[in-house]
Amino acid sequence: MPLEGVRAFVFDIDGTLVHRAGAHEVHAIPGAREVLDRIVASGRPFAVFTNGSHVPPDAFAAQLRAAGLPVEDGQVLTPLCSVQRYLDRFRGEGRVLPFASEPARRYLTDAGVQLVDDGNGTHVDAVFVAHTDTIDFEHLERAARAVIAGARLLTGSYVPAYAGASGPILSRGAMITAAIAKASSVRPVVVGKPSQAAVREMERRLGVRSEEIAVVGDDLRLDIALGQLGRSTTVLVRSGISGDVDLDRVPKAQRPDLTVGTVAELLAWL
């Protein structure tokens, strides 16, 4: 039984629990609410993890509640959360040059992250690329120079695209990260899915060792890879971006422990 011994769950959002019909229209995938309700009834905690970083985590929770899913504030994890676990190594003193929306910047500042607006003349410990709708080339160059000078280049995600309502959506964060990486000749460090920082944030939020967590998602490169980093049980749902992937062509070490058509099929395993 693949889910035997699982004490907590982490779900991806888009393509796993919901489909988006537009920027602000979100519909729960049939069976998603029933799965979450059954997990809650069993006394086990769950969280959801998205690599979306344009708004604070609680904004995603509000979207999911509007779609009828029982997700509370504090149950959503994003790279804005896991980057804080990475920055723990600076013991609260790290200076971060961000590429982020204004709501995301406010969230990070309120969480105690020291953001710097201008790398010129200011020591920068890390450049963090989340999501932004505009790009300033002077800011991009300052970031590259900060990385050349020794700052770490952190990114929420480095995959080229993610699941959208009408097919893959190209990642602007990955584009910005690639530009800085090319200019500085430095390989970026992912702090969203999949990363060790994300694994630590899952454990911290759920209070359970990663080996006792089941990670459920539609993307082999993000969700399944995240679970495998933490030696978690992994469940691939075919309702999203990896729906047409031929698992026989995937290296055995990268395959999920369980594959289902949609999240509703998990009811038979809970």
Image: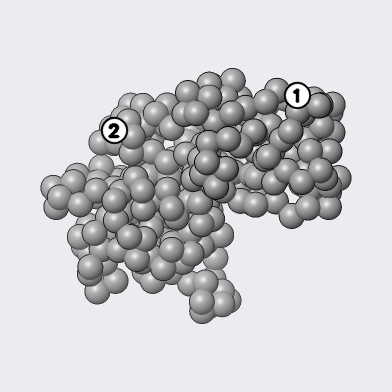
For this rendering, which residue is in front, 34 or 82? 82
Secondary element type, mark 2: loop
Q: In which quarter of the image is residue 171?
A: top right
- State the residue at coordinates (29%, 36%): 71
Q: Position of residue 27 (x, y in %)?
A: 38, 35
- State the residue at coordinates (20%, 52%): 44
Tag shown at residue 72: 2
Which dot, 1 or 2, sits closer to the camera?
Answer: 1
Image position of 33 (left or right of 181)? left
Q: In this view, does 100 lie above or below 90?
A: above
Q: What residue type is labelled 2?
A: Glu
Q: Is residue 131 above or below residue 2?
A: above
State the quadrant of the N terminus: bottom left
Image position of 102 (left or right of 12)? right
Q: Position of residue 187 (x, y in %)?
A: 74, 55
Image position of 174 (left or right of 15)? right
Q: Where is residue 149 in the image (x, y as percent from the top left)?
A: 81, 43
Q: Is residue 88 above or below residue 104?
A: below
Marks 1 and 2 close (CB-CB < 8 Å): no
Q: Quadrant of residue 126?
A: top right
N-terminal of the pair, mark 1 or mark 2, is: 2
For this rendering, which residue is in front, 269 or 233? 233
Q: Position of residue 255 (x, y in %)?
A: 48, 72
**Mark 1–mark 2 distance (CA, rounded to whole Å):** 36 Å
- State the residue at coordinates (29%, 71%): 2
Q: What residue type is labelled 1?
A: Asp
Secondary element type, mark 1: loop
Residue 229 seen by the camera? yes
Q: How crowded is mark 1: few (under 14 residues within 10 Å), some or many (20 or more)?
A: some
State the quadrant of the C terminus: bottom left
Q: Give the mark count.
A: 2
Q: Mark 1 points at which residue?
A: 118
